[in-house]
């Protein structure tokens, strides 16, 4: 269930009305707010990331839940409660116009904490790359404040101790910025003097419309680049048309380096189905929520099956990177299981498969990774490794 809903840029009031029409009283909104804690405890599949397996919260967040009276305060609390998990795959189904940008979908810098520094380890083709930001740059300030202090204040504001990878998580969120605002970053390359750049939010301006995929041919083979379209049913038709032009035995290069927004397994299985002649396993699932309810584990291996009159016998190479996310990562581990060469790790490392949980009175959707995902050999998908490019 790697589903992704592209966030809207409509005014806040319009976005809120999408889920707030059913709740009528402050008590109903408050009940929904309080229920989020139970949803997390019962359904979040990665609570073992935290000490004693207890997902972090705080007295401050608990007080905010009890103070919810309407759709705006419910959404604000929901975003903050999920942020405490330091998990880019836990999000709300609605948003404010000034909510934090989604990472990796609307981010252009991958930043990691290294000692006492915050280092850029990947740069997307974006305003960031056009501004000259490169891998290895140290992010000294965000919004005119030291990155370390900005990160510290983020967690102090939630009243939560910094969870595992909370430092890198926060730096990536802060650098992606608010959806309706430009970002100002101060960086240094090596021993060069610091420089300050202002970058437009990836939510602003006209995003160019693109086809579901791009196709090119070189001496290396037929390259098919997926343009962040693994949730678009039209991708299947476009891929089938591209593969119809593959030459007998020709190498196919599948470029997944721009698939941060995930997708669904129907499309993934349609793509992999071109390269099998019998049922083959490609990914392992473990449904943790059911195991918690019943104490009986539930685990299964998903298979990809051949598609009628659609088969290619040539070699496959898969290209990935930090903006290969969710279902893109599932495709990578799936093709690896099928024997394809996968290069370009690390990927986004998004956790699990997302399930949608709709709150009882307001209808607000809370998205949580409820299934743990692994390679067919049992390696957690977020820990999958492959050769660099």
Image (spheres, helix red, strand yellow):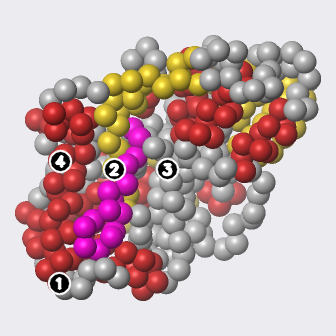
Residue wearing tag 1: 26
Secondary structure of residue under mark 4: helix
Residue 293 at x, y percent in the picture: 16, 38
- Image vertical order of residue 173 relative to residue 299, above or below: below
Q: Is residue 360 magenta?
A: yes
Residue shown at 42% from the left, 86% from the top = 13
Give the residues in magenta. 352-366
Residue wearing tag 4: 41
Alpha carbon separation for disc pair 3 and 4? 21 Å
Viewer-proximal residue, 376 or 216?
Answer: 376
Secondary structure of residue under mark 2: strand
Residue shown at 66% from the left, 74% from the top = 205
Alpha carbon separation for disc pair 2 and 3? 11 Å
Q: Answer yes or no: do the residues labelled 3 and 1 have beta carbons within 8 Å?
A: no
Residue wearing tag 3: 3
Specify few, some or many for label 2: CA neighbours under 10 Å numbering under 14, 14-19, or 20 or more: many
């Amino acid at each position: 269930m790697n589903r992704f809903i592209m966030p809207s840029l409509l005014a806040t009031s319009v976005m809120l009305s999408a889920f707030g029409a059913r709740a009528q009283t402050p008590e109903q909104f408050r009940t929904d707010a309080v229920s989020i804690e139970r949803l997390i405890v019962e359904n979040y599949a990665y609570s073992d990331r935290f000490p004693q397996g207890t997902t972090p919260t705080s007295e401050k967040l608990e007080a905010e839940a009890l103070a919810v009276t309407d759709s705006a305060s419910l959404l604000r609390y929901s975003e903050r409660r999920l942020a405490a998990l330091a998990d880019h795959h836990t999000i709300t189904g609605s948003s404010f116009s000034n909510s934090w940008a989604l990472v990796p979908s609307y981010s252009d810098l991958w930043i990691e904490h290294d000692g006492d520094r915050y280092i850029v380890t990947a740069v997307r083709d974006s305003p960031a790359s056009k501004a000259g930001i490169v891998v290895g740059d140290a992010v000294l300030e965000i919004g005119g404040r030291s990155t370390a202090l900005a990160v510290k204040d983020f967690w102090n504001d939630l009243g939560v101790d910094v969870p595992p990878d909370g430092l890198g998580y926060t730096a990536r969120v802060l650098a992606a910025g608010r959806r309706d605002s430009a970002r100002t970053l101060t960086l240094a390359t090596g021993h060069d003097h610091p420089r300050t750049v202002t970058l437009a939010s990836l939510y602003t301006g006209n995003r160019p419309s693109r086809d579901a995929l791009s196709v090119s041919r070189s001496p290396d083979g037929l390259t098919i680049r997926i343009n962040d379209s693994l949730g678009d049913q039209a991708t299947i038709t476009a891929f089938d048309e591209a593969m119809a032009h593959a030459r007998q035995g020709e190498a196919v290069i599948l470029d997944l380096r721009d698939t941060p927004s995930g997708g669904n397994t129907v499309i993934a299985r349609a793509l992999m189905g071109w390269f099998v002649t019998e049922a083959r396993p490609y990914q392992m699932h473990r449904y943790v929520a059911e195991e918690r309810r019943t104490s009986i584990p539930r685990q299964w291996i998903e298979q990809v099956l051949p598609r009628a009159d659609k088969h290619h016998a040539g070699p496959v190479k898969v290209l990935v990177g930090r903006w290969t996310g969710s279902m893109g990562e599932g495709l990578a581990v799936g093709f690896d299981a099928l024997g394809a060469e996968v290069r370009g790790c690390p990927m986004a490392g998004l956790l699990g498969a997302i399930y949608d949980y709709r709150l009882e009175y307001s209808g607000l959707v809370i998205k949580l990774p409820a299934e743990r995902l692994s390679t067919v050999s049992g390696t957690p998908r977020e820990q999958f490794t492959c050769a660099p490019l």
